[in-house]
Image (tube, rainbow, N blue to C red):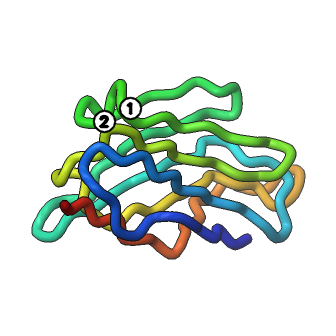
Amino acid sequence: VQLVQSGGGLGQPGGSPRLSCAASGSIFSIFDMKWYRQAPGKQRELVAYITGDDVTKYADSVKGRFTISRDNAKNTADLQMNSLKPEDTAVYSCSAVVTRFNGDYPRDYWGQGTQVTVSS
């Protein structure tokens, strides 16, 4: 199973970039999909997650600005980031809880991480 991220890069305050995470490989089911971020010198923070039933939850720091969504047919999860702030600067990583076959133990898989830098 591989998770490949796209999007990110340099953004301006107030901008609206979108991050995508695509899972591929031997996939039977995908449960929770999550986006984390880690800023320099800070602990990793869970930014948002979405369950298989499309229940979502957000960190207080991004609530109302970021939106997580998923496309189960494509095995993707996106993070729409609006009203960017300099404090959103971090490496963003996606993860997914995946089973590879019926009866498999669910495991966490991770994307490669992508830098988002917010600067004017």
Q: Secondary structure at mark 2?
A: loop
* Rendered residue at 57%/59% (across/down): 108
- Please say if the residues under marks 1 and 2 sit with CB atoms less than 8 Å apart: yes
Which residue occupies the foreground of this view, 20 or 23? 20
Instruction: Give the amino acid at mark 2.
Output: Val
Judging by the rendered image, the residue that carries numbered circle 1 is 58
Q: Is residue 110 above or below residue 99?
A: below
Which residue occupies the foreground of this view, 103 or 57? 57
Give the quadrant of residue 11. bottom left
- The spot of residue 96 in percent (x, y) is 60, 54
Q: Which disc number belongs to residue 71? A: none
The C terminus - image quarter: bottom left
Q: Is residue 2 above or below residue 68?
A: below
Q: In the rendered view, does 78 fall on the left or right side of 27?
A: left
* Rendered residue at 64%/68% (across/down): 3
Instruction: Give the amino acid at mark 1.
Output: Tyr
Give the quadrant of residue 81. top left
Give the spatial CA distance, label 1 vs label 2. Answer: 7 Å
Residue depth check, mark 1 versus mark 2: number of the one nearer the observer:
2
Callout 1: 10 Å neighbours few (<14), some, many (20+)?
Answer: some
* Rendered residue at 28%/66% (across/down): 117
The N terminus - image quarter: bottom right
- The spot of residue 90 in percent (x, y) is 27, 63
- The spot of residue 56 in percent (x, y) is 52, 27
Which residue occupies the foreground of this view, 113 or 11? 11
Which residue occupies the foreground of this view, 2 or 119? 119
Q: Which disc number belongs to residue 62? A: 2
